[in-house]
């Protein structure tokens, strides 16, 4: 017999899968696919400078495996679109993400960061609003992206989508916190 919480979780999982048009493989591994309805927003110079510094600190902390610093700049739950281990769900505890990141983040990503830095942007994500975040309205989430570009689209060949590592932040109580990791393409 299913408890009320299990029923609600099942409905949430099904709704998430339907609303984000996930593939069977993505559902199997518990990935989330961000909606295509991302709208660029104007980013203030002060936020851009703060985010650039924060993203730099966070990426360097992953490189040096400075868990304490990573935790200081992150929420306790992380959306991880690349965590494909079967025991992970849509949202994973920060400690699990850190363990996965220490295995997955490689010298190539860190070298690209050192050569190209990060691009900072601000977006409104429509129809994406994790309930555990306090800054969400009922339909949208304002996010800040720090993107490391390894390859630009078509840089390797005419059919290349490029390669980007994306760290997303939310602003909670006037502080930016890391909450989502993704790469493009996946």
Image (spheres, rainbow, N blue to C red):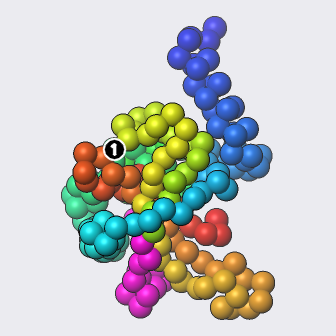
- Residue 70 on image: x %, y %: 28, 60
Say if 48 sits above or below 14 in the image: below
Residue pointed to by mark 1: 76
Q: Nearer the viewer, residue 48 or 85?
A: 48
Residue 184 lies in quadrant: bottom right
* Residue 74 in the figure: left or right of residue 83: left
Residue at the far top in the pictured view: 1
Give the quarter of the figure containing the C terminus: bottom right
Task: Give the dominant element type of the magenta stretch: helix, strand or loop.
Answer: helix
Say if 117 sits above or below 75 in the image: below
Residue density around tag 1, few if under 14, some if 14–19, many if 20 or more, within 10 Å = some
Residue at coordinates 45% horizontally, 55% vertically from top-left?
143
Q: Is residue 89 visible?
A: no
Residue at coordinates 40% horizontally, 66% vertically from top-left?
43
Say if 58 sits above or below 155 in the image: above
Residue 53 lies in quadrant: bottom left
Residue at coordinates 56% horizontally, 11% vertically from top-left?
3
Numbered disc 1: secondary structure: strand
- Residue 107 on image: x %, y %: 43, 82
All told, the count of numbered labels is 1
The residues colored magenta run: 101-120
- Residue 126 in the magenta stretch? The answer is no
């Amino acid at each position: 017999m299913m408890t009320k919480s299990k029923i609600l979780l099942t409905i949430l999982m099904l709704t998430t899968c339907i609303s984000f048009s996930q593939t069977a493989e993505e559902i199997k591994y518990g990935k989330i696919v961000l909606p295509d309805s991302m709208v660029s927003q104007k980013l203030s110079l002060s936020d851009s400078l703060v985010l650039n510094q924060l993203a730099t600190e966070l990426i360097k902390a992953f490189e040096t495996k400075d868990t304490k610093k990573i935790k200081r700049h992150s929420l306790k739950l992380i959306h991880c679109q690349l965590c494909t281990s079967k025991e992970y769900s849509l949202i994973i505890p920060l400690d699990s993400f850190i363990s996965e990141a220490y295995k997955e983040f490689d010298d190539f990503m860190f070298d690209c960061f050192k050569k190209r830095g990060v691009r900072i942007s601000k977006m409104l994500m429509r129809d994406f609003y994790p309930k555990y975040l306090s800054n969400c309205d009922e339909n949208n989430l304002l996010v800040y992206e720090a993107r490391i570009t390894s390859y630009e689209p078509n840089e390797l060949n005419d059919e290349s989508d490029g390669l980007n590592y994306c760290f997303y932040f939310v602003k909670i109580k006037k502080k930016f916190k890391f909450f989502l990791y993704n790469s493009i393409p996946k």
